[in-house]
Image (tube, rainbow, N blue to C red):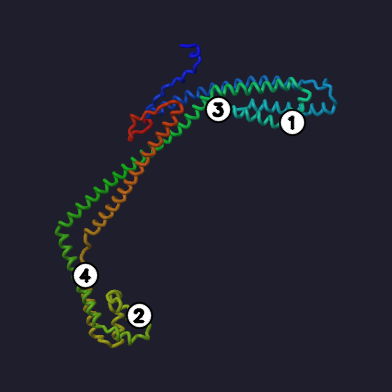
């Protein structure tokens, strides 16, 4: 190997990525955050030490500036007055700066450095004019103060640069925690959906049992002698009602509505009644049992006795039918209840399908979040191992 080979730049050493299982991720993250927090505390302690030493030095330099003897300076009195006045202003700003820096309470290193920088920026804005005027007569004392502040910023910058990786890691860990919490939220939502789907299945099962019980009851009723008797009576009742309707229609056929219209065309009320019977005879007849019809027939003297006899026969038939009205079919309500249950089961099945779609969507979203989390982890040279991951399992330890 030649001499020049010794000075050649060696390739960077690749550090193998740390592997973390998703099932153990929460514990790993807590450990990393604790370790990083301890490093940040050490970083903060360094900043406070630098600040404390600089403030001590700044106070001494401020006192030296305050003790400056302007009277011995050979300059006209007017200029001396202006410089003395500006010196007092500058000293006031210096003391305010020192007081403000002593009262800083920030516990985050970056926040504290930014606050220190802000205090010096405000100091410079307020004191620049005063500083420029006093340097006309005062040199060393002002330079000492500038040297102290310059040293403070130099040391803060050096400390900040040395600890920048800690801050970067802290920010990355915060992002990682946020992404991991999003994963947990998805898991919680999926658990909720699973619970709701289970409840829906239980409701469907309960309704199906109720439906089967009703069907068994329905079959039992249909097989009974009482049901058979009721069905016969219902059939007979329907046939008699058909006969009644035929009687009413036959009555309509013997009424001359044209003549009635000719007779009552000038009587608005009676004409309206004629129209009602002509257009919907059965409905109009059942409304008043033909009383109003018979009245206008008698007034018009159109087959009144025949029509009256027909009406009486219809009313007698109607009364007889009403007396023989059968009991309500006992299966009607049960069949309605079964239809209602079928409708409820259908609604629940639709809801269950929707819950399944939501669960699938969350599963897709979770995979996307895992990929994002993996990308964040590469920033701190960590590889997320999801080989042991199953969709049904939570990403956090129970």
**Residues marked 2 and 4 touching at CB (< 8 Å):** no
Q: Position of residue 99 (x, y in %)?
A: 67, 26
Q: CA distance from mark 3 to mark 2?
A: 94 Å
- 4 or 1: mark nearer the eye: 1
- Which residue is most to the right? 76
Of the residues under marks 3 and 2, which one precedes in the sequence?
A: 3
In the image, residue 358 sits, relative to residue 155, either above or below, namely: below
- 3 or 4: mark nearer the eye: 3
Q: Position of residue 158 (x, y in %)?
A: 58, 22
- 2 or 4: mark nearer the eye: 2
Of the residues under marks 3 and 1, which one precedes in the sequence?
A: 3
Q: CA distance from mark 2 to mark 4?
A: 33 Å
Question: Which residue lies under the disc numbered 1?
Answer: 129
Question: Which residue lies under the disc numbered 3?
Answer: 108
Question: Which residue lies under the disc numbered 2?
Answer: 272
Identify the residue shown where x is 18% and y is 56%.
221
Q: Position of residue 154 (x, y in %)?
A: 62, 22
Of the residues under marks 2 and 4, which one precedes in the sequence?
A: 2
Q: CA distance from mark 2 to mark 1?
A: 107 Å
């Amino acid at each position: 190997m030649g001499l020049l080979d010794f000075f050649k730049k060696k390739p960077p050493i690749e550090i193998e990525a740390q592997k973390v299982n998703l099932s153990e991720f929460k514990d790993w993250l807590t450990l990393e955050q604790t370790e990083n927090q301890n490093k940040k505390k050490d970083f903060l302690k360094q900043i406070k030490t630098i600040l404390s030493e600089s403030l001590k030095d700044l106070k001494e330099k401020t006192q030296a500036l305050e003790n400056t003897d302007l009277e011995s300076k050979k300059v006209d009195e007017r200029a001396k007055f202006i410089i003395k006045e500006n010196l007092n202003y500058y000293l006031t700003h210096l003391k305010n700066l020192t007081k403000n820096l002593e009262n800083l309470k920030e516990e985050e290193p970056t926040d504290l450095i930014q606050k220190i920088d802000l205090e010096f920026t405000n100091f410079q804005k307020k004191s620049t004019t005063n500083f420029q005027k006093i340097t006309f007569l005062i040199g060393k004392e002002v330079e000492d103060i500038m040297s102290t502040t310059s040293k403070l910023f130099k040391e803060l910058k050096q400390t900040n640069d040395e600890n920048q990786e800690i801050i970067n890691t802290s920010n990355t860990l915060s992002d990682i925690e946020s992404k991991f919490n999003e994963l947990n939220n998805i898991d919680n939502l999926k658990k909720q959906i699973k619970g709701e789907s289970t409840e829906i299945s239980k409701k469907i099962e309960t309704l199906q049992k109720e439906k089967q019980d009703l069907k068994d009851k329905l079959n039992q009723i249909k097989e009974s002698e009482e049901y058979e008797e009721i069905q016969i009576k219902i059939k007979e009742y329907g046939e008699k009602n058909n006969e009644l309707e035929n009687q009413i229609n036959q009555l309509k056929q013997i009424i001359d509505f044209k003549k009635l219209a000719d007779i009552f065309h000038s009587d608005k009320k009676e004409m309206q009644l004629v129209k009602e019977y002509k257009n919907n005879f059965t409905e109009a007849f059942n409304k008043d049992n033909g009383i109003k019809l018979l009245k206008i027939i008698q007034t018009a003297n159109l087959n009144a006795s025949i029509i009256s006899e027909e009406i009486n026969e219809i009313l007698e038939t109607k009364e007889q039918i009403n007396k023989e009205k059968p009991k309500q079919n006992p299966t009607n309500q049960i069949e309605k209840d079964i239809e209602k249950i079928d409708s409820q089961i259908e609604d629940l099945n639709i809801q269950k399908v929707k819950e399944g779609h939501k669960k699938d969507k969350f599963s897709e979203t979770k995979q996307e979040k895992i990929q994002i989390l993996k990308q964040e982890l590469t920033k701190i040279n960590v590889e997320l191992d999801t080989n042991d991951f199953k969709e049904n399992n939570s990403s956090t330890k129970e």
